[in-house]
Image (cartoon, grey):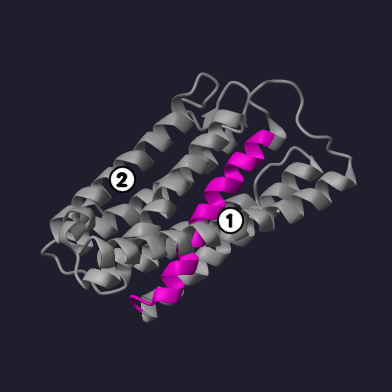
């Protein structure tokens, strides 16, 4: 789905996970422990969300409905939808490894971060070879998105070797929030929800503004991540009696 709804759906997924991490990780370090059963349940919810994303990409009215190749026209069917389905698939695989990490199987430490990194690199390469219909502004918007994708992928890859590194987790979280907000921005620019054409593809001023706007989004993502860390610390220090209930929520 290249429509506003499709970009909004993808953006919402990344915002949910990014904002959740921005509270989860500070609480983890303040408590120095996690409830394994709660984490496994929440990772199962994440897997369900990714499955819903795959189904949405496949079974929207103009989707491929699981058809990859048309024998009648000898052409591929809705490859853009298939690319987004592949993106959700790899994030779903990452979620499965997260669940198994809290199971009695005792997977190798760092395997969950490795699969997350693989999922993000997969997403990045899918966008590198995405069909932008020869529209320069569309390509520019997604090129900026690659900064967030590969930035988060590198953080996750480094976490394989530097487990529970607060700075890496902070920046990975901020890159996820950035991805989420930028997907929403892409939707507003290319296919506004109120209808009508998107932004002028030939106006160079739009390119300059959106490049600047992207880093405004990142500044906001950093501020939100930092603010949630401060809020978590304030809550633990000021409301210590209720900390256990809040910690178990994440």
The N terminus appears in which quarter of the rendering?
top right
Left or right: residue 84 versus residue 213 is left
What residue range appears in magenta?
163-188
Mark 1 crowdedness (10 Å alpha carbons): few <14, some 14-19, many ≥20: some
Residue at numbered disc 2: 47
Q: Quadrant of residue 206?
A: top right
Task: Pick out the residue farthest to the left.
Answer: 104
Residue at numbered disc 1: 220
Q: Residue at x 33, y 75 (%)?
A: 164
Measured along the vertical axis of the image, is residue 206 above or below residue 128? above
The residue mark sitting in front, 1 or 2, is 1
Task: Pick out the residue farthest to the bottom.
Answer: 161
Image location (x, y in percent) of residue 239: 23, 60
Q: Residue at x 54, y 33 (%)?
A: 6
Q: Secondary structure at mark 2?
A: helix
Measured along the vertical axis of the image, is residue 105 above or below residue 80? below
Q: Secondary structure at mark 1?
A: helix
Q: Quadrant of residue 23?
A: bottom left
Image location (x, y in percent) of residue 194: 66, 21
């Amino acid at each position: 789905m290249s429509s506003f709804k499709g970009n909004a759906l993808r953006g919402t997924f990344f915002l949910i996970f990014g904002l959740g991490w921005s509270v989860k990780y500070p609480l983890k370090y303040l408590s120095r422990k996690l409830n394994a059963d709660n984490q496994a349940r929440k990772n199962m919810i994440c897997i369900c969300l990714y499955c819903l994303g795959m189904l949405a990409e496949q079974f929207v009215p103009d989707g491929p409905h699981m058809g990859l190749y048309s024998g009648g026209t000898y052409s591929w069917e809705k490859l853009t939808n298939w690319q987004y389905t592949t993106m959700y698939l790899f994030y779903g695989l990452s979620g499965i490894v997260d669940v198994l990490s809290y199971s009695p199987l005792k997977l190798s430490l760092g395997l969950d971060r490795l699969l997350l990194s693989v999922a993000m690199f997969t997403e990045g390469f899918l966008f590198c070879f995405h069909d932008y219909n020869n529209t320069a502004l569309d390509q520019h918007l997604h090129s900026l998105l690659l900064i967030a994708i590969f930035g988060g992928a590198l953080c996750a890859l480094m976490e394989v070797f530097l487990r529970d590194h607060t700075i890496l987790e902070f920046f990975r979280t901020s890159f996820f929030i950035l991805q989420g907000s930028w997907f929403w921005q892409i939707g507003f620019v290319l296919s506004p929800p109120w209808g009508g054409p998107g932004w002028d593809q030939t106006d160079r001023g739009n390119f300059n503004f959106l490049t600047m706007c992207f880093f405004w989004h990142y500044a906001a993502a950093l501020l939100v991540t930092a603010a949630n860390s401060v809020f978590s610390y304030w809550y633990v220090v000021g409301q210590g009696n209720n900390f256990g209930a809040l910690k178990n929520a994440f």
